[in-house]
Amino acid sequence: MTTTQPIPATRNDAWGFYGTMNEHADAAWPITMTTISQATGQTLEAVRAFLDSRHGRHFADAVLTHLHAGQTLHDAIDAATRQWMGWTIGRQTSKDYGIPRGLPYLTGFVIHCAIADESLAA
């Protein structure tokens, strides 16, 4: 028996991924949450922290670019996820954010945002 974990709601509907997606936000949010969680192996709470951050806004820009190129919403989210997973953390980003060099960009920033979110809550 499998249980489905509920998708956490955004805590930043004016900015971040949700705010940037405008009229696509409601449909894109659950797809993006599960797609990124599956790609990175991170929790939905960690993904929410990422999507609510300024990095989530940049991820939304990538999704919108694919949408404007004619892809469906689901395909645009998949394409942006593959794109961000294909990039790796370089020396300067590692130095600036403390993310291990060589880690997939998306994974690194999801983890980074989750840690930052936890430290703000403490």
Image: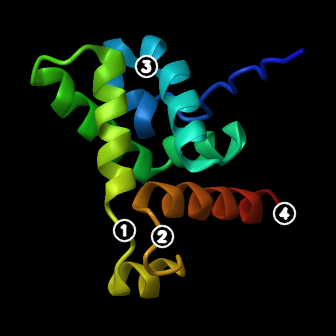
Residue extending farthest front: 1
Pick the front one: 48 or 77: 77
Image side of residue 33 versus residue 92, left or right:
right
Q: CA distance from mark 3 to mark 2?
A: 26 Å
Dots 4, 2 in contact, CB < 8 A: no
Among the two numbered marks 1 and 4 on one chain, the one whose residue lies closer to the N terminus = 1
Q: CA distance from mark 3 to mark 4?
A: 30 Å
Disc 2: which residue: 103
Q: CA distance from mark 3 to mark 1?
A: 25 Å
Q: Is residue 20 above or below residue 72?
A: below
The residue drawn where x is 36% and y is 87% is 91
Under tag 2, what secondary structure?
loop
Residue type at mark 1 is Thr
Tell me, yes or no, if residue 20 can be seen here. no
The label on residue 122 is 4
Among the two numbered marks 4 and 2 on one chain, the one whose residue lies closer to the N terminus = 2
Residue type at mark 4 is Ala
Disc 3: which residue: 28
The colour scheme is rainbow
Tell me, yes or no, if residue 86 can be seen here. yes
Among the two numbered marks 3 and 1 on one chain, the one whose residue lies closer to the N terminus = 3
The residue drawn where x is 75% and y is 20% is 6
Q: CA distance from mark 1 to mark 4?
A: 30 Å
